[in-house]
Amino acid sequence: MKLSYREFGTSKTILIIVHGLYGASDNWVTIGKQLSEKFKVFIIDQRNHGKSPHNNSHTYDDMRDDLLSFMDYHNIDNAHLIGHSMGGKTVLRFCLAYPERTDKVISVDIAPKPYHLQNNFTLSTPDHAKIISSMLNAPLKTFKNRLDIDNYLATDIPNNQVRQFLLKNITRSSEGSFTWKLNIKTISENLYEILDGFSHISPDSNKYLKPVFFIKGEKSNYILNDDLFYCRKYFPKAEFITIPNAGHWLHAEQPELFIKTALYLLDD
């Protein structure tokens, strides 16, 4: 699959940024431009997101190998990787499968654990099933403006920040009606896999021995203190870093601190 992407900078050192569920490369442009002073930055749209092609399959094997194909197509032998949420699991799975193609890896507010289990799916974690159901059932062709869509989604998605993030995926079809950029049907059908991605991966035969940094938001429950156990099963050199006064979208809530942290961690 040929992924859509954005590119910034001229450095010989490559950094690839991978967005999370419901996201796109657009969400990382400000971060990417600032990091491009140090690296050549590629920000990809994952399959079924942004401007990348839609496909009926959406597994971490797919996304892992999409990233490999992207690097091969652009003649990238080795790169630093940053992945947020679902994108974090994509880069974690990638470095386990292709360790020779990666250097330092940053996983942003996600751990290599299944999030559909009750003990891992905390009350503050967005209810993705409800979000996706609301998006699937939204009669977009009947709405006249984005405010109408926002009001409709508010019934099932009371968090305004989450709704505004989702609404970035609204576009106009060739007929002029609203439609989702996301392949929301396929995402719905693959949600269990998206929330997991690691249950079937044995840490005995899958270890990455280079540095992996797990950056978490202080106010987010996606990464808990006990998750260092999960992380070091696969990534023995895992380190935890916390960004204060930030939730799951910490790169948007604390961009300057996130950039300083990333530069410090990736600095040779």
Image: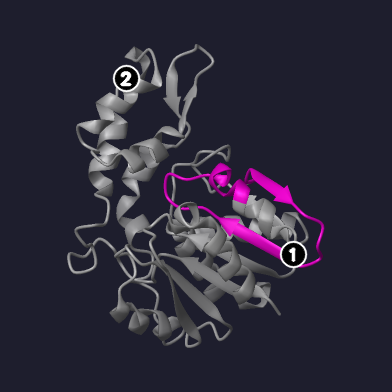
Give the class, few, some or many, for how many residues have Cα within 10 Å of label 2's Cα (few <14, many ≥20): few
78 relative to 89 in the view: left or right: right
Q: How far apart in space, not on screen, are marks 2 and 1 (Cα)?
A: 42 Å
Look at the numbered disc 1 and give the secondary structure of its residue: loop
Check contact, mark 2 vs mark 1: CB within 8 A: no
Counting labels gives: 2
Q: Is residue 187 placed above or below 134 in the rendered structure?
A: below
- Residue annotated with mark 1: 38
Q: For the residue marked with disc 1, what is the amino acid?
A: Lys
183 relative to 42 in the view: left or right: left
Q: Is residue 86 placed above or below 49 in the rendered structure?
A: below
Q: What scheme was used to colour the molecule?
A: one colour
Query: Percent from the top left, x then y, of residue 156?
Result: 21, 36
State the image quarter where residue 65 is shown: bottom right
Q: Residue at x 38, y 64 (%)?
A: 197
Region in magenta? 2-30
Query: Percent from the top left, x then y, of residue 264?
Result: 62, 74
Q: Nearer the viewer, residue 164 or 71?
A: 164
Query: Percent from the top left, x then y, of residue 202?
Result: 39, 80
Q: Residue at x 32, y 43 (%)?
A: 188
Q: Nearer the viewer, residue 204 or 213?
A: 213
State the image quarter where residue 138 is shown: top left
Q: Which mark is residue 219?
A: none
Look at the numbered disc 2 and give the secondary structure of its residue: helix
- Let me know if residue 158 is in the magenta part: no
- Let me know if residue 16 is in the magenta part: yes
Q: Which mark is residue 148?
A: 2
Q: Earlier in the sequence, mark 2 or mark 1?
A: 1
Q: Residue at x 49, y 57 (%)?
A: 251
